[in-house]
Image: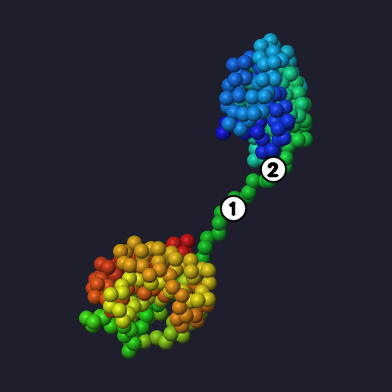
Amino acid sequence: MSTSNHVIASETKQSPAAEVEIATVCCADLAMTSGPSHVLTFLRSHLPTFLPSCFLAFLALSIAGCQQPQKQTPKVVVGDHATTIEDLALRLGLRIEERDDAFVVLKNAANTVIIFTHTEGRFFVNGKPMGPVGEVKRQGGTLYVPDFLIPQIRRYLRSAAPPPVVRPSPLKPKALVVIDPGHGGQDPGTISPGGLYEKNINLQVAQRVAGLLEQKGLGVVMTRRDDRFIELEERADIANRRNADLFVSIHSDSAPNRSVQGFTVYVARAGSPDAFRAAGAISQAMAGTGSDSHGIREADYKVLVQTSGPAVLVELGYLSNSQDAARLRDPAYQNRLAQAIANGILTYIR
């Protein structure tokens, strides 16, 4: 939409009769400037919104014979009571949006003003004709208008909301993530048909995740860094005592049906919106590893229920499935899983 089209249409919806009146006045103002060619240009630019009004206005002008105006030269001499259009805009808190030989468009966040700059031209505020412009003069490329327009226009302007004060955002304190490698010590977790222990896979991937997060400047606490047994309540308490931003427990799954494979992300049934948001970010990132996704599921695992902050549990894959077990044994695949989990955590923390 052109600027002048927006100006005439205004932010305020007019009645059909008012639209015809406004369009008629504008066509007449333009006809006074440079004849029918200028009127036709104006109509073409405004037809998308004001087709009925502009057509009726042009028809009315044609019948009245105003499409053949007598050009008149402005008579005002620049003096103490004239001001430049730039100064007028500045003093009214407006900016010059568009200008040509026939009119000038001024705008701010709440107002649109159009000033027709020929003899007997009028000014419009937010789509409504408000009064005559008075005499104008051009000297070189400078346009002078009567300074009495400033208070006359100001009285019709809407109050614009003050621009928001932009303050630098305070630096977010260093985020803390607790990474919990499931099982450990005398608790091996599930064991693959080939003898692969879950506790070892969990620790290997968790250590990689922790390293990636630390490289990005996050604070990381691991519930265990070696093969030791830690009670479930203690794991949750580690996160609670440190008021962790996120708790992520890492596990490997098993199922009686050995054809089942893929990863799953769990959240407690009464998990917080932040917990579900974190789970969604991690699940989406892990979908890029090539593993089948079982999506986000709800389960009241003790480490999820007893952690006061956002908490998720990630099942990396099924050790009961030969393909998943082979992949989980592969250090390169472990790296892919760790990178995906880290990326999901970083997305959530941001």
Q: Left or right of 318: which side holds 128?
A: right
Q: Position of residue 63 (x, y in %)?
A: 69, 15
Element marked by disc 1 = loop
Q: Position of residue 337 (x, y in %)?
A: 32, 68
Q: CA distance from mark 1 to mark 2?
A: 21 Å
Residue drawn at 33 percent across, 84 percent down:
189
Q: Which residue is mark 1?
A: 167
Q: Residue at x 63, y 49 (%)?
A: 164
Judging from the image, what secondary structure is the residue with disc 2 in? loop
Q: Earlier in the sequence, mark 1 or mark 2?
A: 2
Quadrant of the rendered structure where residue 191 is?
A: bottom left
Residue 335, quarter of the rendered image: bottom left
User: Three-letter amino acid code at disc 1?
Assistant: Arg
Q: Nearer the viewer, residue 250 or 179?
A: 250
The residue at 45%/81% (across/down) is 301
Residue 238 visible in rendering: no
Q: Nearer the viewer, residue 81 or 133?
A: 133
Tell me the number on the disc at residue 160: 2
Image-quadrant location for residue 203: bottom left
Q: In the picture provided, is 290 more to the left or to the right than 175?
A: left
Left/right of residue 275 with respect to residue 15 in the rendered view: left
- On residue 101, which mark appears? none
Q: Position of residue 40 (x, y in %)?
A: 59, 20
Given the current orientation, which residue lies at the most extreme left position? Answer: 194
Residue nearest the observer in this picture, 208 or 120: 120
From where the camera sits, is residue 181 visible?
yes
